[in-house]
Amino acid sequence: MRRGSHLGVELFIEDGAYTTVAAAVSMLVVLTLLFSAATAVWSAARSSEVQAAADATALAGANVVSSYRTAATVVDAAVLSMGLAGFCTTGAGLVGLLIPGGQAAAKKTVDAGIRMLELRNDLAASASKGLSKLEDALPYLVAANGTRVCAAQGSEKITYTGTAIAAPRESASSFPALEGSGVPTQGLKETSERLDEAAEELARAAEASEDAKREAWLADCGKEGANMQERAASLSGLSAAENPDYASSVTWSPQVAVDRTRAYYRWRLEHNAPEGTGTEAAADASAREAFYRFALKEFEGARVEEVDGVVVSTVPLLPRNTDEVRASELYREAIWPSSYEDKGLTLHYGSACPGATGSSGPLLALSATEAGTARECEVCRFGVGDVGKTPAASTSIDNGYEYHLRAFTLALEDYVDCRNEELALEKKARGEAEGAASAFDDALSVLGGKRPRIAPPGRNGTLGFAVTGESATPAELTSAFAPGTSVASRGAVAGAVLAPDKATAENNVLSEFLSTFAERADGGAIGLVDDVMGLWGRLLVSYGDLTGKLSGVMDDLLGGLKQWGLGSLATWLEDRVDDAVKALDLEPADLTLMKPVLTDSANVVTHAGVSGLADVQERLRSITVGTTDPAALLQAMGYGAVEAIQESTFTIAEIPLPGGGSFPLTVRVRDLLGGGKT
C-alpha cells in the first residue's frame, strides 16, 4: 500500500519538472474554476438586475405623485389668480362708476370683473371634483406607472413583474380656495347695479350743477366783454386783489362774486358824490348813497357755503326798480330827514334841501309819503321813485354792474338748488358705494387665508416591487467543466421619496404651464382695463409672491383712473377698494419642484399605512410573474382595492379664458396604462 501511494505521486513529479499528468490536472482545475466563476457572475448579475428593476419601479411611482403635485399647484394658481384678476377688474369698475364720463366703460369693466369671478367659481368647482377624483385614483396610477416601467426593464429572455404602491394610500390634502360655495357674486351684482343707477342720477345732477355754476361764473367774470369783474374795474378803483379774474368755473367759486360785490359797494359808497350842481344832482347822489348803503348791508354777511352736506346761500337779490324797492327794507327804513312846514310834515332827500324851511322833524321812511303820514317836498320832489331809478338804470342795460349782479344772483339760486340735489344724490350714491364696498370686502375675504395643503397619497414615498422567474444558465456558459444550472425566482423592493429641487424663475412648477398659457391667452381691452389677460397673466406669474405684487397691480389700475378726474366720492371708494385688496392675507405659495430620489425602503414601509407590508418577502413570493394588472398586483401585496381611471386622457379642469374659449389642464392616463402606446 505504501508502494502504491508512492507510485501515484510519482505520476505527477519528476526531477526538475511537472509531469504531463500534473499539467493536465492543473488545466482541468483552472477551466472548472473559470466556468464556475462566470456562472457565478451571471447569477449575481441576475440578482442585481431585479433590484435595479425595483428601483426604477419605485421612481416611476414617485414620478406620478410629483406630477400630481404640479397639476394641483397649477390649478390653485389659476383659480387664485383668476379670482384676484376678477376682483381687481371689479374694483376698478366700481370706482369708475363714480367718475363723470366714465360710467359706460366702468359698467363694462364691472361686468367683466364679475364674469371673471363667476368663471373662477366654475373653475374651482370643476377643479375640486377633478383633483378629488384624481387623488382617489392616485394609488392606482402610481401602481400602473410602476407596473409599466417594471415590465419595460425585461428582455426577450427575462420577464420582470412588479408594481409601485403609494405610502400612505389616504389623502390629507386640503384646498380652501376650491372648497365651499365660491366667491359670492350676487351681492356684487346687486350693489353694483344700484351704485350704477345712483351714479347716473348723480352724474346728471352734477352736470346740471356745473351748468348752473358756469352761468354764475359767466355773469361774474367769465363772459366776454361786460361782466361783474369788468364793470367793477370800469366803475370803481378796486385793486386786482379785490377784483380778481378767473379763467374757468372749475377754479372759481360763487363766494368770489360775493366778496367782489361787497368790495364794490363799499368803494362806491365811500366815493359817492353829486354828479353836478343843484338840487336834482344832490337828490340823485342821496338816492345812490341810500342804495349803496343798503346793498352793502345786504352783502355784508352774505355767504355761499356748504354746511353739513347742504349748500346755504345768504346772497340777496337786490331790487331792480321802484316796485321792488317798495318790497325792500329801503322802503321801510326811517333814514330820511323831515321838517314841519306850513302844509304839514314834509320828507326831504337831505337836511340841505332848500325846501326844508321849517323846524326839523323825525327821520322818515319812504313809505311815509305814500301812506299819507308825510308830504313830498315841493322843491326836491324826493320819493321812492328817486331811489328806485338808481338800480333801474344800471340793471336794465349791460353796462351797469347791477345788470350782471342780478344775472349772477339768479344763476346762483339755480346753482344752489342743483348743488343741493347733487349733494343729496351724492349721499345716496355714497350709501350705495358703502354697500358695494362691503360686498366687495365680503367676496374678497373668500380668497384670503391659507394656500392649499397638497398631501396626496404617496406623499411619504413610494415602494417599488419587482420579481422574476427562474433563469437557466445560458448555453454559452454550459460545458463539461460547469454543468448548466438555473437561478431561482427572485424579487427586490425599493423605496423612493420626493426631494426638493430649488425653484427658480425658469425652473418651477408653473414655468412650463405659463409658457403654454401665454401662447393660448390673447390680450384684450375691456372697459377701463387695457389688457384683461395681461392683468391675469401678471397675477398668475406672481403666484409665488402675490402679497408683494397684488398691491402694485391695484395701484396701477386705480392710478390709471386718475386721468378721468376722480371726485371726492370716487377717491373715497378708490381708497376703500385699494385698502381692502392690500389687506388681503395671502400666504406665499411654494413653487419648489419635487423630484423622485431613491431611499431606504424601510423608511417608506413604516409610513405606508398597510399592515400586510410587514412581511415584504412573503408578499413578494405571492406575485405571479407575468401579471400585468396593477390592481391585481396591489391586491397580492395586501394593499387592497383601489379606484381606477380608465380614460385615456383625464381633464382635471377647463381653465376658462375671459376672451372666450378655455385652456384644458389634462393628465395623459393612457401613457400610464398603455405603456406609451396611443
Image (cartoon, grey):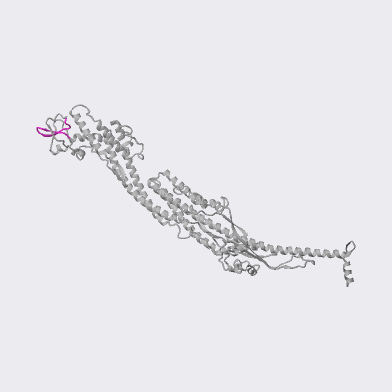
Q: Identify the residue at image location x=78%, y=63%.
A: 34
Query: Is residue 202 something that shows in the picture?
Result: yes
Toward the front, the furthest residue is 2
Q: Position of residue 78 (x, y in %)?
A: 51, 55
Kindly indicate the quadrant of the structure image that contains residue 628: bottom right
Magenta region includes residue 337: yes
Q: Quadrant of the C terminus?
A: bottom right
For residue 78, side relative to residue 30 (left or right) = left
Residue 407 position, x and y percent, is 28, 38
In this rendering, the answer to whether 222 lies above or below 46 is: above
- In this rendering, the count of numbered labels is 0
Q: Is residue 129 magenta?
A: no
Magenta residues, as a range?
Answer: 336-351
Whole-percent x, y for residue 419 in the image = 32, 45
618 up-or-down from 296: above or below: below
Q: Residue furthest bottom?
A: 1
Describe residue 598's horizontal placement relative to residue 580 as left or right: right
- Rendering quarter of residue 367: top left
Which residue in the rendered view is the most extreme toward the top? Answer: 277
In this view, 420 is above or below 377? below
Looking at the image, is 654 positioned above or below residue 245? below
Q: In the image as oriented, which residue stretches furthest toward the left?
A: 342
Q: Is residue 675 visible?
A: no
Q: Nearer the viewer, residue 249 or 26?
A: 26
* The N terminus, quarter of image: bottom right
Q: Position of residue 368 (x, y in %)?
A: 15, 38
Q: Nearer the viewer, residue 48 or 328?
A: 48
